[in-house]
Image: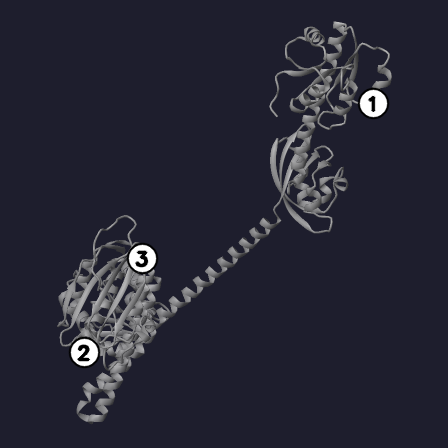
Amino acid sequence: MPEREKTNILIVDDKAKNIFALEEVLAGAGRNFIRAINGKEALKIVLNEEIDLIILDVQMPGMDGFEVAQILKSHKRTREIPIIFASAERKEHQSMMKGFEEGAVDYLYKPLDPAITEAKVSVLLQLHLQKKELVKKNLILEKHSLLINNSADLICIINVRTLQFEEANQAVNSMLGYTIEEFRNTSILSYLDAEGRLTVENLSQSDKEKFSFETRVYCKDGSARWLNWNVVSKDGLWFANSRDITDKKAADQEISQLNAELKENITQLEATNNELESFSYSVSHDLRAPLRSINAYARIILDDHYDGLDEELRRLFDIIQRNANKMGVLIDDLLRFSRLGRRKLEKVPVDLVELTQRALKDLTEHNKSEADIQIGTLPSAEGDPALLYQVLLNLLSNAIKYSAKRPAPKITIGALENENELIYYVKDNGTGFNMDYVHRLFSVFQRLHNGNEFEGTGVGLAIVQRIIAKHGGRVWAEGEPDKGATFFFSLPRPATEKIQHNYGNP
Amino acid sequence: METRKIDILLVEDNPDDADLTIRALKKNGLASSIIHLQDGEEALDFIFCKGVYSDRVFEEMPKLLILDLKMPKVDGIEVLRQVKSDSRTRAMPVVLFTSSSEERDITKSYQSGVNSYIVKPVEFESFVKVVSNLGLYWLSLNQIPHR
């Protein structure tokens, strides 16, 4: 409610000259006069206006002053308005006043003495205004107390000297299970564990004005909750707000436990990785030596004793030698594959056209290819050039290999783009494959063709897959038996540049 | 112990690999003065005239040291390191001839001053070719300071 600057005084009298006379006597700063010439009008005004004092003529035609006052006193909203009766009949008031002992009511005798009138009015007005102020303050207090008691946090006042709770809100009950009465005048120390007691005792010796701390607090049922106390210290009292952080503590503990487990897992992984590394190292060194011997001595027998061997023995030694060689190639491929896992990516801008040309040159230098090879426009990417070269080398070598037996082998290298990635493809019109087995294409040692038809160990595409995955891209393939195959790989679009190109479909 | 002048000191623990290496060298007439030792410790004794080789004339150094990498007791890297850190033996060409194509082995070898790092091929024809090439290169083409 906005503050009114003036106090409203209602003067009720059936004679206008009486009203004027009163107004003259009471005129003063901050006073506003409202007039009513009968009881009905007076009640109407009181209902609509905020009235601070009523001077009520007792003898009025129709409803007299006492009747008006009775109505006012019987309504809650108007009960507190002070009333001064004005009457010419001095004797009658004693009996009539009976109903008005409570509340601010006074009596003036006509003819009015200006000094007494002013004195009574100002006293009653002052009393009324003070009472109003009190009611307002009470309302505020009531609101605050509602707020405080409604809080889920424990709000309390602690005496620093005795460390006893002087006040606490309802949260002591909802949070800890005690009643406010049980809690009041007990020491905070009695609810804490040893560590918490030490914390609080130390803080009570300090002269910090504002601080916070965490303690475990024991509930009435014997369980404990973690509270975070935020304290303002003033005049030997702590004004504390304590939040229940039990759940957060539990979550924190869970997180640190998870972290510890994670750390342990990493350590284990590192150990496994080291084991794998030394395993592959042993494979590299120790497995090749016996193979070399098998191969070499089979060869030496063939070379040095060729004449002494019949056709069948020569064939058998040849098989031994060939298989030892094959095993050597398998080991080399496997090692190459396993090394990829350990290798760190060194990303730089890469010109895919240049890489493709280089790979093609290296592939066709010793084995001339009959294929018609077309390189489309390829956007530059970001990646490890040596590894991407390996990807192109493997895909192109496959394309050449699997299309070599066609009458007119054709290989196309091209690119597509979408919002997030650059997509490259190598398309051939070779043997193709059945899409039913597409999921096996990129696994190690998985082959869709048999070794008599096409040579290979089945590691090439697995390497492609691994390299592209390390770059954050994807690989996939489309094919049809005897129609050809298209191998796609994508790379994340470089963050730094936007490339505007249009690329055709494969 | 014989102390005749030698061209190649081959340090190799695998007898088959040693046999194959010597065979390959023989095919190219390079095996006339070769000594084969079984491990790194023996190699160091030989090079620095210790133990059973204390009577050897230090100055009669081999023209080429072919080292396997993984050997019992003292490995190839350690032999390499000691040869390259002694001013009297530093000039002797050392070739690491090993099955390992691991990057870290190659790096470590070059950091220790190896002159060549050659991976032994599994396939015999390539093996013979590689051994002949390395023998011819280091013994015929390459020039080292005269002592």
As helix, strand or loop, the secondary structure at mark 3 comes to loop
Q: Position of residue A200 (x, y in %)?
A: 67, 39
Q: How many marks?
A: 3
- Mark 1: which amino acid? Gly
Residue A58 in sight in this render: yes
- Please state the horizontal and vertical placement of residue B33, each as a whole percent of the image: 20, 74
Q: CA distance from mark 1 to mark 3?
A: 99 Å
Asked if residue A369 is positioned above or below residue A68 in the image, the reply reads below
> Residue A99, labelled with which disc?
1
Label 1 vs label 2, nearer the camera: 1
Residue at disc 1, secondary structure:
helix
Q: Nearer the viewer, residue A23 or A194?
A: A23
On residue A447, the disc is none
Whether A400 is drawn above or below A471: the answer is below
Q: Quadrant of the C terminus of chain B?
A: bottom left
Residue B125's x, y, as percent?
20, 78
The disc labelled 3 sits on which kind of residue?
Leu
* Mark 3 or 2, closer to the camera: 3
Which residue is under mark 2? B26
Chain letter of disc 3 in the image: A
Res. A164 image quadrant: top right
Q: Are marks 1 and 2 on the same chain?
A: no
- Can you tell which quarter of the image residue A160 is in? top right
Position in image of residue A437 (x %, y %): 32, 75
Distance from Cα at disc 1 to Cα at disc 2? 141 Å
Q: For the residue carrying disc 1, how many other residues have a C-alpha within 10 Å: few (<14), some (14-19), or many (20+)?
A: few
Callouts 1 and 3 in the same chain? yes
Under circle 2, the secondary element is helix
The dot on residue A345 is: 3
Q: Earlier in the sequence, mark 1 or mark 3?
A: 1
Q: Amino acid at mark 2?
A: Lys
